[in-house]
Amino acid sequence: MNTPEEPTFRESVDIMYNRAVALMDLSPGLEEKIRVCNATYTVRFGVRLRGELKTFTGYRSVHSEHMEPVKGGIRYATGVNQDEVEALAALMTYKCALVEAPFGGSKGGLCIDPREYDENELELITRRFAYELIKRDLINPSQNVPAPDMGTGEREMAWIADQYKRMNTTDINGTACVTGKPTNAGGIQGRTEATGRGVQYALQEFFRDADGVKKAGMSGTLDGKSVVVQGLGNVGYHAAKFLSEEDGCKIVGIIERDGALTDPNGLDVDAIRHWIAGHGGVATYPGATYVEDGASVLELDCDILIPAALEGVINRTNAGRVTAPLIIEAANGPVTAGADEILRGKGTVIIPDMYANAGGVTVSYFEWVKNLSHIRFGRMQRRQEEARHQLIIDELERLSSDSGIGWELSPNFKTKYLRGAGELELVRSGLDDTMRTAYQSMASVWHERGDVDDLRTAAYLVAISKVADSYRAKGL
Ligand code: NAD
């Protein structure tokens, strides 16, 4: 994806890291310790498929172990390589620090196009890859906990958890070895939607920040804003769906592998997702304008651009033509260091990946805690909460009737007020709180420090100082 003069993904992350570190007072030793990737394991393994032995290459990279377990997704894509997993592992370190998820950073990947294999084959490949990582403690509830990423989802996570449990039959916390599992296999409600939901909460918080909105040259709220989304996968689909259904945004462009769809009046996100599932792409979708050169739609006139597919898509070659005043990096690394410079020069506000897509790891943290505590969130309190609310309602109604005022509480209020919080409500509330708090910590640096003029540098400053504090506390 990068043009020749463009740094690699890993170098891009380091450039952004160095820019932030230059504004900090870290010792050179600590600065290097935080930046470098601790270890990357490469594995090549064979699986017998369709009568022949096929060899696969996979990676698991551990960037920082200042906190353990380390955490980070497993990606299935043909472009997976060491540079990429190391960049993604580094981003995980900073992301976890920023949102205060108590993990170090890690990432894994397998060079494979999952669409070329059927479900049984994928299970064989996934279990074998997991076996290789588990036997080296690169999957382990207290040391290294993967999650879904591009090309993987809850199905793969369930296979990995099962494989771990087969190999560690007496580990009572075995289910916590991976997050993003289906709810019937130790998962948590709200994990599948979490990253897209986090993008929505991030944008809601951005539009509460009047200074930030002004810096982007924008005004008002999310209502009525036009949005272009690249990648209608797990993250892009949920972000687009929630923004259009709940916040009044208009999705005017959707970019997929085989082209893009546009409609100035707003696209039907669910219908398009359904169409892609049935037809393998967007090209033949009848209800919108099809653009064969999908990447050109990144340059469409819109208020908010959400790259939610892969890295390096906004680079030196097209950054100058991107017109959206606000970009939210739902994908990891969609804007290269070179493009970042061009966009900053134009005054484009970028909500950086390490914050924007942190919803996934945040809810993964909740899932891990749920697995270790062996109890669903809300199970102990929910009915007790409802009983206390019922007491208040009964008392209000008694007072109203005894005093002759005759007030009646509306049935809608009663239903809403009475309902105790279940797992999904608690997960969403914890996620919303995390996204708001992390935004505020970044935004205060952005607005208050004269030498910081973008949210990415602010995010790095907050994250690096937390990692540095943690190393210092260990005596390093
Ligand atoms: P996914 O595999 O569910 O979806 C990716 C989508 O992008 C697919 O619809 C695919 O067809 C599309 N796509 C692929 N190549 C494209 C191209 N060249 N142009 C346009 N579209 C293309 O993956 P995902 O889990 O949604 O992850 C997307 C991004 O979000 C990745 O950068 C990932 O690292 C990041 N992310 C994911 C999570 C998570 O919880 N899944 C969490 C944090 C960050």
Image (cartoon, rainbow, N blue to C red):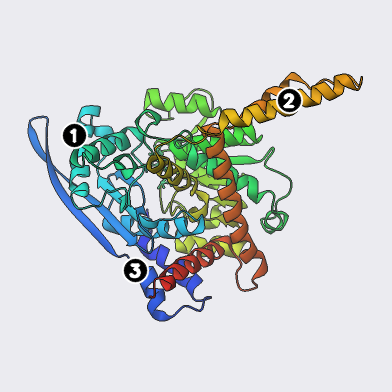
Disc 2 marks which amino acid?
A: Phe
* SS assignment at label 1: helix
Pick the front one: 167 or 438: 167
Residue designated by label 1: 124
Judge: label 3 CB < 8 Å from ligand 1.
no
Q: Is residue 245 visible?
A: no
Query: Eyeballing the image, is 395 above or below 230?
Result: above
Ligand 1 shown in quarter: top left
Residue designated by label 2: 413
In-image side of 67 versus 329 (left or right):
left
Q: Dot 1: few (<14), some (14–19), or many (≥20) neighbours within 10 Å?
A: some
Furthest-right residue in this view: 404
Pick the front one: 437 or 126: 437
* Rendered location of residue 342, percent (x, y): 53, 63
Residue designated by label 3: 36
Disc 1 marks which amino acid?
A: Leu
* SS assignment at label 2: helix
* Rendered location of residue 404, percent (x, y): 92, 19
Q: Dot 3: few (<14), some (14–19), or many (≥20) neighbours within 10 Å?
A: some
